[in-house]
Amino acid sequence: MEHHYYFLVEILSGLGLGHFAHGFIHVVHSWLVICILVVGAFLLTKHVQLVPRKAQSMAEMIVQGLEDFMVEITGPEGRAFFPYIATVFLYIFISNLLGLVPGFFSPTANLNTTLSLALCTFGLTHYIGVKYHGKKYVKHFLGPAWPLAPLMLVIEIIGHFARVMSLSIRLFGNIFGKEKIIGILFGLAGMYLAPLPILFLGILVSLIQALVFTLLSIIYFAGAMEEAH
């Protein structure tokens, strides 16, 4: 949630990077999320065992669940793009949760972060389409009736760019709203007296928004892989 005091900003200010830290607070906290993901992946894979322990079992359950969820929508071909989907889900989920910790900020509460994620999904969607269909991918934009092809082309192009707006603004708006609401409650009730139901709601919103972004990305990938009708 949003606070006037941010630990990372204060640390970077002490290193002479205060102007950058204050101006690009979402970038600073994105670096923190990336470090969490990298360190977490290293620690989990360093001690992989045939008989998994609790941490390994939980990680395998999350990865397997995401993979099964994607394969049900895209088919077995979707496994080629699973690393992107898993990374995006974990990055968004951890970013959303970070704002619930006093002194930290959710990178996804900034439109620049969510727009970057949406552009990555947009670019990969059309890369998949070209990879699977080559030049025939253009048929996805022309509709089923050739006389209406010019009109459908314009509509489809607008629709595909609208996906970027939809993905970015939906995620940004929900997380920004969550940050503001919980920030106000912390201000009224005190940092350590915020209502627990509201914090639970914040966790739920963080999970749901990560799932929504991931689900829509998978649907776009599946649509790009399908044959044009």
Image (cartoon, rainbow, N blue to C red):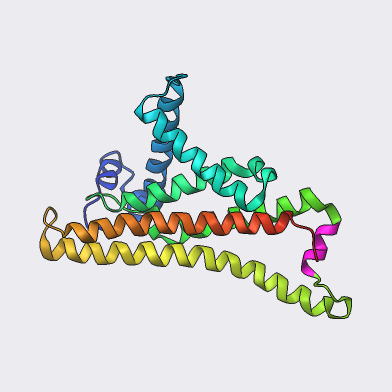
The answer to whether residue 34 is above or below residue 147 is: above
Q: Residue at x 39, y 65 (%)?
A: 174
Most extreme residue toward the right is 147
Instruction: Using residue 187 as the reference point, say whether residue 109 is left or right of it.
Output: right
Image quarter of residue 106: bottom left
Q: Give residue 108's position: percent from left, percent from top.
A: 41, 56
**Camera sees residue 110:** yes
- Of residues 80 and 95, the one nearer the viewer is 80
Q: Give residue 88's position: percent from left, percent from top.
A: 51, 48
Residue 73 among magenta residues: no
Instruction: Using residue 134 as the reference point, say whether residue 11 is left or right of it.
Output: left
- Of residues 199 and 179, the one nearer the viewer is 199
Give the position of the C terminus as an image quadrant. Answer: bottom right
Q: Give residue 4's position: percent from left, percent from top.
A: 22, 57
Q: Main secondary structure of the magenta part?
A: helix
Q: Residue at x 48, y 48 (%)?
A: 89
Image quarter of residue 163: bottom right
Q: How many marks?
A: 0
Instruction: Using residue 90 as the reference point, say whether residue 15 is left or right of it.
Output: left
Q: Residue at x 27, y 53 (%)?
A: 100
Give the position of the N terminus as an image quadrant. Answer: bottom left
**Camera sees residue 118:** no
Q: Give residue 35's position: percent from left, percent from top.
A: 40, 36
Which segment is the magenta one?
136-141
Instruction: Using residue 78 as the reference point, say whether residue 167 is left or right of it.
Output: left
Q: Residue at x 63, y 44 (%)?
A: 81
